[in-house]
Amino acid sequence: ANAYVGFDTITNQIEHKLLKRGFQFNVIVVGQTGLGKSTLINTIFASHLIDSKGRFTADEPVRQTTEIQAVSHVIVENGVKLRLNIVDTPGYGDQINNEGCWDPIIKYIKDQHSAYLRKELTAMRDRYIQDTRIHCCLFFINPTGHSLRPIDTIVMKKLSEVVNVVPVIAKSDSLTIDERDQFKAKIREELAYNNIRVFPFDTDENDEEEVQINETIREMIPFAVVGSESNVIIDGKSVRGRKNRWGVVNVEDETHCEFVNLRNFLTRSHLQDLIETTAQIHYEAFRSKQLLALKE
Ligand code: GDP
Ligand code: MG
Protein backbone atom coordinates (compact mmCIF):
# COMPACT_ATOMS: atom_id res chain seq x y z
CA ALA A 1 0.00 0.00 0.00
CA ASN A 2 2.98 2.28 0.58
CA ALA A 3 4.50 1.60 -2.81
CA TYR A 4 3.58 5.05 -4.16
CA VAL A 5 6.67 7.24 -4.44
CA GLY A 6 5.14 10.03 -6.49
CA PHE A 7 7.13 10.07 -9.71
CA ASP A 8 3.87 10.42 -11.61
CA THR A 9 3.93 14.08 -10.61
CA ILE A 10 6.79 14.63 -13.05
CA THR A 11 4.26 15.73 -15.67
CA ASN A 12 3.12 18.52 -13.33
CA GLN A 13 6.70 19.41 -12.59
CA ILE A 14 7.44 19.66 -16.31
CA GLU A 15 4.31 21.68 -16.91
CA HIS A 16 5.26 24.11 -14.18
CA LYS A 17 8.71 24.60 -15.67
CA LEU A 18 7.39 24.99 -19.21
CA LEU A 19 4.77 27.49 -18.14
CA LYS A 20 7.41 29.60 -16.47
CA ARG A 21 9.63 29.50 -19.52
CA GLY A 22 6.89 29.98 -22.11
CA PHE A 23 6.91 28.83 -25.70
CA GLN A 24 8.46 30.22 -28.84
CA PHE A 25 6.78 30.01 -32.24
CA ASN A 26 8.31 31.46 -35.40
CA VAL A 27 6.35 31.82 -38.62
CA ILE A 28 7.48 33.09 -42.00
CA VAL A 29 5.04 34.24 -44.68
CA VAL A 30 5.98 33.89 -48.35
CA GLY A 31 4.14 34.89 -51.52
CA GLN A 32 3.53 37.61 -54.07
CA THR A 33 2.85 41.13 -52.91
CA GLY A 34 -0.84 41.85 -52.36
CA LEU A 35 -1.94 38.27 -51.68
CA GLY A 36 -3.02 39.17 -48.17
CA LYS A 37 -0.09 37.85 -46.12
CA SER A 38 -0.05 40.63 -43.56
CA THR A 39 -3.84 40.62 -43.39
CA LEU A 40 -4.02 36.89 -42.69
CA ILE A 41 -1.50 37.06 -39.88
CA ASN A 42 -3.44 39.88 -38.32
CA THR A 43 -6.62 37.83 -38.71
CA ILE A 44 -5.19 34.70 -37.09
CA PHE A 45 -3.87 36.48 -34.03
CA ALA A 46 -6.31 39.34 -34.32
CA SER A 47 -7.39 40.09 -30.81
CA HIS A 48 -3.88 39.54 -29.53
CA LEU A 49 -1.98 41.70 -31.95
CA ILE A 50 -4.24 44.68 -31.91
CA ASP A 51 -2.36 46.57 -29.23
CA SER A 52 1.11 45.28 -29.92
CA LYS A 53 3.45 47.80 -31.31
CA GLY A 54 4.95 46.64 -34.56
CA ARG A 55 1.62 45.33 -35.71
CA PHE A 56 1.22 45.82 -39.44
CA THR A 57 -1.59 48.36 -39.52
CA ALA A 58 -4.00 48.51 -42.40
CA ASP A 59 -3.97 52.23 -42.82
CA GLU A 60 -0.26 52.85 -43.02
CA PRO A 61 0.22 54.45 -46.43
CA VAL A 62 3.02 52.11 -47.48
CA ARG A 63 3.22 48.83 -45.78
CA GLN A 64 4.58 46.94 -48.74
CA THR A 65 7.42 44.93 -47.36
CA THR A 66 10.74 45.56 -49.01
CA GLU A 67 12.99 43.48 -46.81
CA ILE A 68 12.72 40.46 -44.58
CA GLN A 69 11.39 41.71 -41.27
CA ALA A 70 10.73 39.94 -38.02
CA VAL A 71 8.14 41.29 -35.63
CA SER A 72 7.81 39.84 -32.12
CA HIS A 73 4.77 39.59 -29.95
CA VAL A 74 4.22 38.02 -26.57
CA ILE A 75 0.73 36.64 -26.27
CA VAL A 76 -0.87 34.93 -23.30
CA GLU A 77 -3.84 32.57 -23.07
CA ASN A 78 -4.88 31.05 -19.75
CA GLY A 79 -1.47 31.63 -18.25
CA VAL A 80 0.38 30.11 -21.19
CA LYS A 81 2.88 32.51 -22.66
CA LEU A 82 3.68 32.30 -26.37
CA ARG A 83 6.44 34.35 -27.90
CA LEU A 84 5.39 34.75 -31.47
CA ASN A 85 7.82 35.85 -34.16
CA ILE A 86 6.28 36.75 -37.49
CA VAL A 87 8.71 37.08 -40.34
CA ASP A 88 7.34 39.00 -43.28
CA THR A 89 9.13 38.67 -46.61
CA PRO A 90 9.12 40.96 -49.62
CA GLY A 91 6.80 39.60 -52.28
CA TYR A 92 8.96 37.25 -54.27
CA GLY A 93 8.28 36.59 -57.91
CA ASP A 94 7.10 40.18 -58.43
CA GLN A 95 9.95 40.96 -60.79
CA ILE A 96 10.35 40.32 -64.51
CA ASN A 97 13.41 38.23 -63.85
CA ASN A 98 12.70 36.02 -60.88
CA GLU A 99 15.89 34.00 -61.06
CA GLY A 100 17.12 33.44 -57.52
CA CYS A 101 14.37 35.55 -55.93
CA TRP A 102 13.93 32.85 -53.31
CA ASP A 103 17.59 32.93 -52.20
CA PRO A 104 17.18 35.58 -49.47
CA ILE A 105 14.28 33.63 -47.95
CA ILE A 106 16.14 30.32 -47.92
CA LYS A 107 19.21 32.08 -46.58
CA TYR A 108 17.19 33.65 -43.78
CA ILE A 109 15.88 30.26 -42.71
CA LYS A 110 19.33 28.67 -42.83
CA ASP A 111 20.87 31.60 -40.97
CA GLN A 112 18.55 30.87 -38.03
CA HIS A 113 19.67 27.23 -38.00
CA SER A 114 23.24 28.33 -38.19
CA ALA A 115 22.84 30.80 -35.32
CA TYR A 116 21.27 28.08 -33.19
CA LEU A 117 24.05 25.64 -34.00
CA ARG A 118 26.72 28.17 -33.09
CA LYS A 119 25.06 28.76 -29.73
CA GLU A 120 24.81 25.03 -29.14
CA LEU A 121 28.48 24.55 -29.89
CA THR A 122 29.90 27.23 -27.63
CA ALA A 123 31.68 25.84 -24.60
CA MET A 124 29.54 27.77 -22.13
CA ARG A 125 26.26 27.36 -23.85
CA ASP A 126 23.15 28.90 -22.37
CA ARG A 127 20.83 26.60 -20.54
CA TYR A 128 18.05 27.87 -22.72
CA ILE A 129 18.96 28.90 -26.25
CA GLN A 130 16.95 31.69 -27.77
CA ASP A 131 15.25 29.97 -30.68
CA THR A 132 14.67 31.85 -33.90
CA ARG A 133 14.42 28.76 -36.10
CA ILE A 134 11.39 29.03 -38.38
CA HIS A 135 8.74 26.50 -37.39
CA CYS A 136 6.28 27.17 -40.14
CA CYS A 137 6.28 28.72 -43.58
CA LEU A 138 2.88 29.89 -44.75
CA PHE A 139 3.10 29.80 -48.52
CA PHE A 140 0.53 31.97 -50.31
CA ILE A 141 -0.81 30.72 -53.64
CA ASN A 142 -2.45 33.06 -56.11
CA PRO A 143 -6.17 32.15 -56.45
CA THR A 144 -6.02 31.77 -60.23
CA GLY A 145 -8.08 28.59 -60.26
CA HIS A 146 -5.73 27.06 -62.83
CA SER A 147 -2.49 25.71 -61.51
CA LEU A 148 0.67 26.69 -59.69
CA ARG A 149 3.03 29.04 -61.45
CA PRO A 150 6.30 27.29 -62.33
CA ILE A 151 8.10 29.60 -59.94
CA ASP A 152 5.77 28.58 -57.08
CA THR A 153 6.67 24.97 -57.70
CA ILE A 154 10.37 25.76 -57.62
CA VAL A 155 10.18 27.89 -54.51
CA MET A 156 7.95 25.48 -52.58
CA LYS A 157 10.30 22.65 -53.44
CA LYS A 158 13.31 24.61 -52.14
CA LEU A 159 11.46 25.73 -49.03
CA SER A 160 10.18 22.26 -48.22
CA GLU A 161 13.76 21.07 -47.97
CA VAL A 162 14.52 23.45 -45.11
CA VAL A 163 11.26 24.28 -43.35
CA ASN A 164 7.70 23.05 -42.67
CA VAL A 165 5.69 24.39 -45.58
CA VAL A 166 1.96 25.00 -45.13
CA PRO A 167 0.43 26.08 -48.46
CA VAL A 168 -2.64 28.31 -48.48
CA ILE A 169 -4.80 29.61 -51.29
CA ALA A 170 -4.88 33.35 -50.74
CA LYS A 171 -8.03 35.46 -51.09
CA SER A 172 -10.13 32.42 -51.77
CA ASP A 173 -13.28 34.56 -51.73
CA SER A 174 -12.49 35.20 -55.39
CA LEU A 175 -13.30 31.55 -56.22
CA THR A 176 -16.62 29.74 -56.04
CA ILE A 177 -16.67 26.66 -53.80
CA ASP A 178 -16.52 24.42 -56.90
CA GLU A 179 -13.61 26.31 -58.41
CA ARG A 180 -11.89 26.26 -55.08
CA ASP A 181 -12.22 22.50 -54.63
CA GLN A 182 -11.00 21.80 -58.15
CA PHE A 183 -8.08 24.14 -57.64
CA LYS A 184 -7.20 22.45 -54.37
CA ALA A 185 -7.23 19.02 -55.98
CA LYS A 186 -5.10 20.29 -58.84
CA ILE A 187 -2.53 21.74 -56.44
CA ARG A 188 -2.36 18.52 -54.43
CA GLU A 189 -1.68 16.69 -57.68
CA GLU A 190 1.07 19.10 -58.60
CA LEU A 191 2.66 18.85 -55.17
CA ALA A 192 2.70 15.07 -55.45
CA TYR A 193 3.94 15.13 -59.03
CA ASN A 194 6.83 17.41 -58.10
CA ASN A 195 7.64 15.46 -54.96
CA ILE A 196 7.08 18.43 -52.72
CA ARG A 197 6.74 17.26 -49.12
CA VAL A 198 4.61 19.70 -47.21
CA PHE A 199 3.83 19.55 -43.50
CA PRO A 200 2.64 17.38 -41.67
CA PHE A 201 4.95 14.39 -41.86
CA ASP A 202 4.22 11.00 -40.40
CA THR A 203 6.73 9.51 -38.01
CA ASP A 204 6.79 6.06 -36.44
CA GLU A 205 6.03 7.75 -33.12
CA ASN A 206 2.55 8.67 -34.35
CA ASP A 207 -0.32 6.64 -32.97
CA GLU A 208 -3.30 5.64 -35.05
CA GLU A 209 -5.27 8.76 -34.15
CA GLU A 210 -2.44 11.08 -35.13
CA VAL A 211 -1.96 9.26 -38.43
CA GLN A 212 -5.68 9.70 -39.08
CA ILE A 213 -5.61 13.41 -38.25
CA ASN A 214 -2.66 13.95 -40.57
CA GLU A 215 -4.47 12.12 -43.35
CA THR A 216 -7.46 14.42 -42.95
CA ILE A 217 -5.17 17.45 -43.07
CA ARG A 218 -3.47 16.18 -46.23
CA GLU A 219 -6.84 15.83 -47.91
CA MET A 220 -7.62 19.43 -47.04
CA ILE A 221 -4.34 21.07 -48.03
CA PRO A 222 -3.96 23.75 -49.31
CA PHE A 223 -6.22 25.70 -46.95
CA ALA A 224 -8.38 28.14 -48.89
CA VAL A 225 -8.38 31.22 -46.70
CA VAL A 226 -9.87 34.66 -46.48
CA GLY A 227 -8.37 37.31 -44.26
CA SER A 228 -9.84 40.53 -42.96
CA GLU A 229 -8.87 43.20 -40.52
CA SER A 230 -12.32 44.66 -40.16
CA ASN A 231 -15.79 43.54 -39.26
CA VAL A 232 -18.98 43.26 -41.29
CA ILE A 233 -22.54 42.88 -40.07
CA ILE A 234 -24.12 39.48 -40.82
CA ASP A 235 -27.60 38.76 -39.42
CA GLY A 236 -27.26 41.72 -37.12
CA LYS A 237 -23.99 40.47 -35.67
CA SER A 238 -20.62 42.06 -36.16
CA VAL A 239 -18.17 39.43 -37.42
CA ARG A 240 -14.73 39.43 -38.91
CA GLY A 241 -15.34 39.39 -42.62
CA ARG A 242 -15.36 41.16 -45.93
CA LYS A 243 -17.79 42.32 -48.56
CA ASN A 244 -17.23 41.31 -52.13
CA ARG A 245 -19.10 41.15 -55.41
CA TRP A 246 -21.19 38.19 -54.30
CA GLY A 247 -22.08 39.29 -50.82
CA VAL A 248 -20.41 39.02 -47.46
CA VAL A 249 -17.88 36.47 -46.33
CA ASN A 250 -17.67 35.52 -42.69
CA VAL A 251 -14.02 34.63 -42.23
CA GLU A 252 -14.84 32.40 -39.26
CA ASP A 253 -17.61 30.47 -41.01
CA GLU A 254 -16.37 27.07 -42.17
CA THR A 255 -18.91 26.98 -44.98
CA HIS A 256 -17.36 30.17 -46.38
CA CYS A 257 -13.66 29.41 -46.17
CA GLU A 258 -11.05 27.34 -44.39
CA PHE A 259 -9.61 30.04 -42.20
CA VAL A 260 -10.77 28.35 -39.00
CA ASN A 261 -9.36 25.02 -40.17
CA LEU A 262 -6.00 26.65 -40.76
CA ARG A 263 -6.03 28.43 -37.42
CA ASN A 264 -6.97 25.26 -35.55
CA PHE A 265 -4.30 23.36 -37.40
CA LEU A 266 -1.61 25.89 -36.53
CA THR A 267 -2.60 26.55 -32.94
CA ARG A 268 -4.76 23.73 -31.58
CA SER A 269 -3.58 20.56 -33.23
CA HIS A 270 -0.09 20.97 -34.67
CA LEU A 271 1.73 23.75 -32.82
CA GLN A 272 3.92 21.32 -30.91
CA ASP A 273 4.42 19.13 -33.97
CA LEU A 274 5.58 22.12 -36.03
CA ILE A 275 8.12 22.99 -33.35
CA GLU A 276 9.29 19.40 -32.91
CA THR A 277 9.54 18.64 -36.62
CA THR A 278 11.65 21.75 -37.09
CA ALA A 279 14.12 20.58 -34.46
CA GLN A 280 14.11 16.89 -35.32
CA ILE A 281 13.94 16.94 -39.11
CA HIS A 282 14.92 20.30 -40.60
CA TYR A 283 17.43 21.52 -38.04
CA GLU A 284 18.87 18.04 -37.61
CA ALA A 285 19.51 17.75 -41.35
CA PHE A 286 21.21 21.16 -41.35
CA ARG A 287 23.24 20.32 -38.28
CA SER A 288 24.56 16.99 -39.46
CA LYS A 289 25.50 18.47 -42.82
CA GLN A 290 27.44 21.27 -41.15
CA LEU A 291 29.19 19.00 -38.70
CA LEU A 292 30.16 16.52 -41.42
CA ALA A 293 31.55 19.38 -43.51
CA LEU A 294 33.70 20.47 -40.54
CA LYS A 295 35.36 17.07 -40.36
CA GLU A 296 36.52 17.12 -43.96
P1 GDP B 1 0.56 41.34 -48.64
O1 GDP B 1 1.28 42.22 -49.58
O2 GDP B 1 0.61 39.92 -49.10
O3 GDP B 1 0.99 41.48 -47.22
O4 GDP B 1 -1.00 41.74 -48.73
P2 GDP B 1 -1.89 42.62 -47.71
O5 GDP B 1 -2.20 41.85 -46.48
O6 GDP B 1 -1.23 43.93 -47.54
O7 GDP B 1 -3.26 42.76 -48.55
C1 GDP B 1 -3.33 43.37 -49.80
C2 GDP B 1 -4.78 43.80 -50.12
O8 GDP B 1 -5.60 42.64 -50.26
C3 GDP B 1 -5.42 44.62 -49.00
O9 GDP B 1 -6.21 45.61 -49.62
C4 GDP B 1 -6.30 43.64 -48.26
O10 GDP B 1 -7.43 44.24 -47.66
C5 GDP B 1 -6.72 42.71 -49.38
N1 GDP B 1 -6.99 41.34 -48.87
C6 GDP B 1 -6.31 40.69 -47.91
N2 GDP B 1 -6.81 39.47 -47.70
C7 GDP B 1 -7.86 39.33 -48.57
C8 GDP B 1 -8.80 38.28 -48.82
O11 GDP B 1 -8.77 37.20 -48.23
N3 GDP B 1 -9.73 38.51 -49.80
C9 GDP B 1 -9.78 39.67 -50.50
N4 GDP B 1 -10.73 39.81 -51.42
N5 GDP B 1 -8.92 40.68 -50.27
C10 GDP B 1 -7.96 40.53 -49.32
MG1 MG C 1 2.62 42.49 -46.38
Image: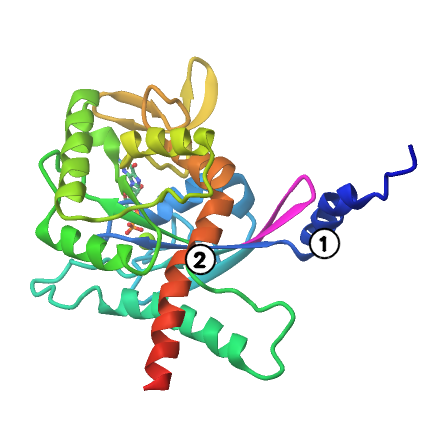
Q: Nearer the viewer, residue 165 or 41?
A: 165
Residue 3 magenta-highlighted = no
Q: Nearer the viewer, residue 172 or 137?
A: 137
The image quarter containing residue 257 is top left
Which of the numbered marks, if any, corresponds to residue 32? none
**Residue 224 spot, x, y in % from top left:** 28, 33
| Quadrant assignment for the C terminus | bottom left
Which stretch did the figure color magenta?
A: 74-83
Q: What secondary structure is found at the residue carrying circle 1? A: helix
Which of the numbered marks, if any, corresponds to residue 280? 2
Please say whether residue 50 is visible from this viewpoint.
Answer: no
Residue 77 magenta-highlighted = yes
Q: Would the CB of label 1 be found within 8 Å of ligand 2?
A: no
Q: What secondary structure is found at the residue carrying circle 2? A: helix
Question: Image point 23% across, 53% down: which residue?
Answer: 33
Crowding at mark 1 (Cα within 10 Å: few <14, some 14-19, many 20+): few
- In space, the residues marked 1 and 2 are separated at their CA atoms by 22 Å
| Mark 1 in CB contact with mark 2 (< 8 angstroms) | no
Residue 104 placement, left or right of 60: left
**Residue 75 spot, x, y in % from top left:** 59, 49
Residue pushed farthest right? Answer: 2
**Residue 119 spot, x, y in % from top left:** 53, 77
Which residue in the structure is indicated by mark 1? 17
Callout 1 amino acid: Lys
Residue pushed farthest top? Answer: 235
- Ligand 1: quadrant of the figure: top left
Indicate which label's residue lies in the foreground, 1 or 2. Answer: 2
**Residue 106 spot, x, y in % from top left:** 28, 66
Crowding at mark 2 (Cα within 10 Å: few <14, some 14-19, many 20+): few
Q: Earlier in the sequence, mark 1 or mark 2?
A: 1
